[in-house]
Image (cartoon, rainbow, N blue to C red):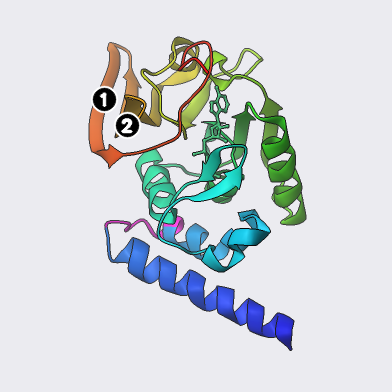
Amino acid sequence: MHQANEKDKFAAQREAMVLTQLKSRDITNSAVLNAMAEILREKFIPAEYFDEAYYDGPLSIGSGQTISQPYIVALMTQELKVDKNCQVLEIGTGSGYQTAILAKLAKEVYTIERIENLSATAQKTLGDLNILNVRFHIGDGTCGWPEVRQFDRIIITAATPQLPEPLAEQLKIGGLAVLPLGGEYTQELVTIEKTSSGLKSKFVCGCRFVRLIGKFGYTE
Ligand code: SAM
């Protein structure tokens, strides 16, 4: 009985999140809305924040890191224009929540996290949810995926002073990247399209993320 009530509580909170935090703002892509309605955000939240699983903001996931606000996850996914033909590279696995949303929409997701225990927890969560089209790597994502490979889409979920050069190289011509670009405290969310004549960026909105730490990001 208690379990059934918990399930109902989260289902109602998830429905309300989609309505009041996403649809009432500017999330209009039905595939993104469906993925956000389907993925159980409570599975990615540490036990002490369980009751805030659908809070309209970021939450701590330990190791000084955060799971992003639901709206930002949806917005970045919508801006990335992902479909079932896409191979996506994600830098900053974190809790794996954004990874799970992307995995619903893409052919495959390749995700890199520098903090081992966060990646291990995310791998277990996605495994438990039977999300199988994801490859995980632990290391410095600013150096790119550690095999020669190019991606249709790249998403960086931590603040970076630039699109790291190895990532620009691993983006296909015609591909799109979404990232929080700028200083350590505030950034601009931008999309970058790689064309045959160079990189074209577009401003989306102001934002605030934890730092991307690595060879082509910030120093620790
Ligand atoms: N999207 C994630 C989620 O849904 O939980 C939240 C990501 S969190 C805002 C940013 C993550 O980027 C952190 O887990 C952090 O450890 C990771 N990170 C920072 N620098 C990194 C790097 N160079 N390579 C890989 N991951 C990095």
Q: Is 65 in the magenta? A: no
The residue labelled by disc 1 is 201
Horizontally, residue 165 falls left or right of residue 43, namely: left
For image coordinates 59% across by 39% down, the residue present is 94
Between residue 29 and residue 119, name the one nearer to us: 119
The amino acid type of the residue labelled 1 equals: Ser
Q: How many numbered marks have been drawn onto this rendered protein structure?
A: 2
Between residue 18 and residue 108, name the one nearer to us: 18
Quadrant in the rendering for residue 53: bottom right
Quadrant in the rendering for residue 181: top left
**Ligand 1 quadrant?**
top right
The amino acid type of the residue labelled 2 equals: Thr
Which element type, helix, strand or loop, lies under badge 2? strand
- Compared to residue 73, the image places residue 213 above or below, namely above
- Compared to residue 139, the image places residue 108 above or below, namely below
Which element type, helix, strand or loop, lies under badge 1? strand
Ligand 1 contact, mark 1 (Cβ < 8 Å): no
Q: Residues within 10 Å of mark 2 (few under 14, many from 20)?
A: many
Q: Distance between the residues labelled 2 and 1?
A: 6 Å
| Residue span colored magenta | 26-32
Q: Which of marks 2 and 1 is nearer the N terminus?
A: 2
Where residue 184 appears, as percent x and y from the top left, is 36, 26
Q: How crowded is mark 1: few (under 14 residues within 10 Å), some or many (20 or more)?
A: some
From where the camera sits, is residue 39 visible? Answer: no
Q: Is 29 in the magenta? A: yes
For image coordinates 32% across by 57% down, the residue present is 27
Where residue 220 appears, as percent x and y from the top left, is 53, 18
Residue 55 shows which numbered tag? none
Where residue 80 appears, as percent x and y from the top left, is 40, 39
The residue labelled by disc 2 is 191
For image coordinates 74% across by 89% down, the residue present is 1
Q: Do the residues labelled 2 and 1 touch (CB within 8 Å)?
A: yes
